[in-house]
Image (cartoon, helix red, strand yellow):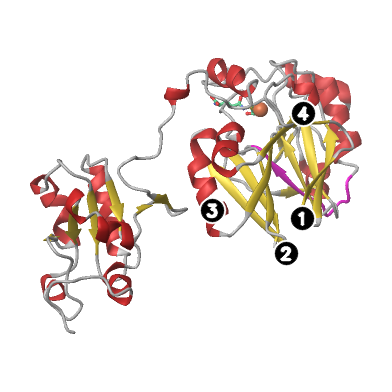
Amino acid sequence: MLIFRQLFDPQSSTYSYLLADSRSHEAVLIDPVFDQARRDAALIQELGLELVATLDTHVHADHVTGAWLLKQTCGSAIAVSAASGATGADRTLAHGDRVKFGNRYLEVRSTPGHTHGCLTFGLDDESMAFTGDCVLIRGSGRTDFQQGDARALYRSVRSRIFSLPEVCLLYPAHDYRGLTVTSVAEEKKHNPRLGGEVGEADYVGYMKNLDLPHPKKIDEAVPANLRCGQPGNEASFAADPGWAPLRFTFSGVWEVEPHWLEENLSTVHVLDVREPEEFTGPLGHIRGATLVPLGELAARAKELPKDRPIVAVCRAGSRSAHATAILQKAGFTDVANLPGGMLRWRGEGRGVEGGAI
Ligand SMILES: N[C@@H](CCC(=O)N[C@@H](CS)C(=O)NCC(=O)O)C(=O)O
Ligand SMILES: [Fe+2]
């Protein structure tokens, strides 16, 4: 079975696509975004997948690719178009190549026009294709910079995307209105730039008059993407917090393992966000914990000391996950959740004060 997830970066309106073979657990990620690499790595880990490669449809002008960063964290190979001119890839792709993940593969289609190195990736059974900024939903990528060529884009679409089966689903690299997916049949019929009877000269005329401002991040993004997302200055991205071996979850929360907390209790403040009767109830509480019920936390956050990191705890680990977000909003940087809360803590036989035996 195919595992498939569409992921969104709200800053650049970019979609990234995770595809995996459920039997072998091998996965590929199309068009990862640098700022979302931590989130993507968390999802890959939570789904029990092994990221074998990241693939970029083109050298993006509006965001930095997560390819290099994911290679550091997940060990994935970086695959980019040979025609893109990017350096630092492990594999360069050309028309007709196949990128395997388990028993599945993506077929590489060269679809220049938005940039001269643009690729479309078609799934082995032609049920879906990832069109980058070639075909967008009821639109197309712009052709006014980065070797853009409207004639080439029109021909790419007509010969290499609209030639796919009508039912083939098309997934773009961006959508600026929140639309998520389309199909070959739909775009052939309804794409105002490229569909119906629109000819090459009509398309060229349309694109000449688009008059869009350049992407805000173009001066930073293009040079970084020509290095496959390796930062020019490696100190320019946020490293993982160093105070504990923390895990970042797909839901966006930092977590610390109960065994680490028990061994390092004196190096942190434990913040219990349950109600007072739970704190003194049968589950007991962790030695030295401060009680601030979740409902009072936002108002009372300034009472809390900032000299040590804070680990939030509750009964099952869900109220305390929300507490970490409240603390971060209140300016605390070193905060983590205790997953599973007091239930797991006691289940693992860890020490408590009070509580039933
Ligand atoms: N406002 C966006 C511009 C986005 C943009 O230009 N997107 C390119 C893709 S990299 C495009 O082809 N847009 C087509 C369109 O908006 O019709 C930004 O600053 O990043
Ligand atoms: Fe683009």
- Label 4 residue SS: strand
Q: Are marks 2 and 1 in contact (CB under 8 Å)?
A: yes
> Which of pointers 4 and 3 lies earlier in the amino acid sequence?
3
Q: Residue at x 78, y 33 (%)?
A: 119
Mark 2 and mark 3 lie on one chain; the one further toward the N terminus is: 2
Q: Quadrant of residue 344?
A: bottom left
Q: CA distance from mark 2 to mark 1?
A: 7 Å
Q: Tell me if residue 166 is in the magenta stretch.
A: yes
Q: Earlier in the sequence, mark 3 or mark 1?
A: 3
**On the image, numbered disc 4 is attached to which residue?**
81
- Closer to viewer: mark 3 or mark 1: 1
Amino acid type shown at disc 1: Gly
| Residue on which disc 2 sits | 23
Q: Earlier in the sequence, mark 2 or mark 1?
A: 2
Viewer-closest of 152 and 58: 58
The main secondary structure of the magenta stretch is loop
Task: Name the one closer to the observer, 297 or 238.
Answer: 238
Q: Is residue 190 left or right of residue 268?
A: right
Which stretch did the figure color magenta?
Answer: 164-173
- Badge 1 marks a residue whose secondary structure is loop
Question: Would you name the residue on which mark 1 appears?
Answer: 102
Residue in view at x 35 percent, y 40 percent:
241
Q: Is residue 189 left or right of residue 321?
A: right
**Horizontal and vertical percent for residue 321?**
31, 58
CB under 8 Å between callouts 2 and 4? no
Q: CA distance from mark 2 to mark 4?
A: 28 Å
Looking at the image, residue 231 lies above or below residue 119: above
Label 3: which residue?
A: 43
**Is 306 placed above or below 354 here?**
above
Which of label 2 and label 4 is nearer to you? Answer: 2
Nearer-N-terminus badge (1/4): 4
